[in-house]
Structure formats: structure tokens, C-alpha cells
Amino acid sequence: MDETKKLQILSDLVSIQSVNGHERPVAEYLKTLFDKAGIKNQILSFPDDPDRANFVAELGSGKPILAISGHMDVVSVSADNWKTDPFKLTKKGDKLYGRGSTDMKSGLAAMVIAMLELKASGKQINGTIRLLATAGEEIGQPGAELLQKQGYIDDIDGLLIGEPSANRAVFANDGELDISILSHGKTAHSSTPAAGNNAVEHLLDVLEQIRHRMTELMENTSNKVLGKTIFNVDVLTGGTQYNAIPAEAVAGINIRTIPELPNQKILDEMQKIIDQYNQQTNGDISLKVDMNIVPILGDENSKLIRLVKQIGTPFVKSGKIPPQASDQHDNPIMPFSLTGIDTLGASGRTDASKFLVNDSLGANFVVFGPGNDNSHQDNEFVSQQMYLSFIDIYEQLLTAYSAS
């Protein structure tokens, strides 16, 4: 496939306005490519939403089975803040601008093209390459969760996520909990507080107990790759006016989690505090889990990591994976090497958190894809050279994985 066609596929993907919740058109576009190539594929509709779908394609047969994955959705756009049409791939020098160009339609396109080129080459695949294109990674990861429940992960031997990493191979991600603490009381005039039940005061009291317990739990637990648990109260609302006892109050808590202090342990401890508080006071506190993403800690010396380093390092040394930050930052958020592929853990989540929910420790897993540190930003772009290089890297990687 020539360079023009490779750029056209990325351009076509960027032009599809697959803002979270509207992924089916991407799946339908991918199906046309794989049908034409004669590669087995299927669109997997969401049971309750006709505008959403996952896409699965397979090349080869038997073991080993390498799953490669990219998400089809993008975040929303404030078009007035863009210098170009966000849904038209626009080239300026080496930069290809467009929503999703970095996160992560370039990674998805590179994986797709690698499979198409392998098929066209007639090379024998000793095993199976399984593409899992997901819906909804940006909000809640329902696509990955559905594929996991449908068994598409049960028999895999490795997982490659094509999220933007440039020359960094990410093998670990912290987990995340979003928790709402709700306090229910009774309104009354502020001059007669005994006639009511102050929801704000109860919420503040129970938050203090939760914070104290979390500090105890976090004090002596850390992970050498992911660091410590991070606990923040980010939202606090309650009451309507100065002279009325508040009947409702809510706190929003965000926690970045590590394997040493698991998500369920945190939730159990919080629920225990709330139950005791409700029993000992006239408070009415409840807990609601809005997001529950487990931490992933893969094997830094896995087969996939070794192959990524072996194949990717020459591209880094030759400058074909240029170290770039973004138009909004002079320096990358995470360090770039100029001599090889760095392995590291990173904050933030990927679909691996749902795919590997039952195999979160020691998995043969890596996040490795084209892009830079401008995900979700206005004027998002990807390096053209990096995008084209990753097509070659993926093709070599898919071939080497099945052969080794």
C-alpha cells in the first residue's frame, strides 16, 4: 500500500465524527476495508444502542493469539478553538491535525493497515492476530467491557493497545475510582436547626473519617512502578441558601489506585465507616460508585515488551519516531528517549483495564502506538513520520510475535 493510501485511511477515520457514543460508522468503514481484503471480520452491535458497536477482525488461525486493540471514539470538540477543521485531516509540515489524530485514530489506522498489508503479502501467520476495535473508551469503556464478557479475551496470549506512546512502552496503569458520597437530611429554618437534620454537617463529619482512614491505608503502601495511591475530594455541594438547614449534600471523590491497595479494599473500608456512622448518629449517608477501573501491572520483561524494544529501537535511533510534545507544551509530559524504547508505568487508563480485569498482574501486555502528549487538546495532531513508521513497526511486530 502506498503512502497516499495510508494517509487516506487516516483521513477517512478522522472525518468520521465518532464522538463518544457514535462509533458505528467507524466500524462500518473498517468492515469495508477488511471485506475487500478478504479478512474475516464482524460488527458487534451494542444490545441497547444501535449507534454503538465494536468491531472484531482476525488474520491467521490457532495459537498464539495476539490481541491488538484501538478505540473508535473521540472526545468532543470546541471547534472555535481550532485553527483547522477538527474533522478534516490537515497537513502542516510533518504534523497531521485533526480530532483523534493522536488519540487514537492513527494507532487504529496503523494496526488496520498492518493487517491489510500482511494479508496482501501472502505471508504465513503462525497463529492469530485479533483486532479489537472498541466503542466508548473515553467514557466508561463499555466496548471493552462487552468484548471481555463475550469471551474475546479468554484465549489470548498477549495484548497490544495502540494508544499514543511514541517511543515509550507502557506496561502499567494506575486504577481509578470515582465515588459519590451522598448525605440525606431534613430541611428546616436556620433559627430552629433541631427541627431539621443538617446533611452538610453529616457529610463533612463522615468525609473526615474517610480521609483519616485513607491516610492510614496509604501511608505504608506503594508500588515501585505506579507510586502511591492518590486520594482527592474534588466535588462538594450542598444547601440552597444561608437561612435553611440543608437536606441534601454530595461529595465527589477521585482515587488513583495501585495493586497494593486494591479498589475493593478501599470501597469496603469506606462502606464500613459509613455503616458505623449511620448506626451511631442520625445521619443518612450512602455511597455510589460512578467508575471502578482496576490498576494494571504487566510484565516488564514480557514477550511483547522484548519485541517492541527489538523492533522499535532502530526506528528511534534513526529519528523515524520523532520526540514531540504538543503545540501547548514545550516539553513532553513524559520523557522521550533518543536512543531506544523506554518502559514505564503511566497514569491514566486504557481499555486494558476492562480487558485484563481478571488478569491484571503480570500480563503479557503493552501500550505502544503513534502520537504525542496532545490527546484531548485543541489542535490535536500526530507526526506523519511517526504514523507511517508505526505501520512498519506493527507489521514487523505482528509477524515476529506469531513466529517466536
Image (cartoon, rainbow, N blue to C red):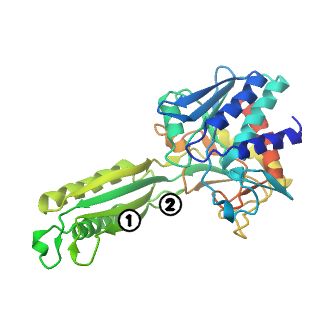
Given the image, on which type of amino acid does mark 2 rest? Gly
Rendering coords of residue 93 (x, y %): 87, 59
Q: Is residue 146 left or right of residue 55?
A: left
Q: Give the camera-side residue of 330 and 184.
A: 184
- Give residue 32's position: percent from left, percent from top: 73, 28
The alpha-carbon separation of the residues under discs 2 and 1 comes to 12 Å
Mark 1 secondary-structure assignment: helix
Report whether 352 appears left or right of 319: left
Mark 1, residue position: 219
Residue 316 in view, yes or no = no
Q: x and y percent of residue 200 in the render?
A: 25, 69
SS assignment at label 2: loop
Q: Residues within 10 Å of mark 1 (few under 14, many from 20)?
A: few
At 60% from the left and 39% from the top, the residue drawn is 23
The tag on residue 79 is none
Mark 1 residue type: Glu
User: What residue did someone put label 2 on?
Assistant: 227
| 127 up-or-down from 385: above or below | above
Q: Quarter of the image for the N terminus: give it.
A: top right
Q: Mark 1 or mark 2, which is nearer the start of the sequence?
A: 1
Residue 393, position in %: x, y? Answer: 78, 41
Q: Residues within 10 Å of mark 2 (few under 14, many from 20)?
A: some
Which residue: 67% across, 31% down? 28
Is 313 left or right of 364, judged from the image as shown?
right
Image quarter of the C terminus:
top right
- Above or below 364: residue 209: below
Q: Are marks 2 and 1 in contact (CB under 8 Å)?
A: no
Q: Quadrant of residue 346?
A: bottom right
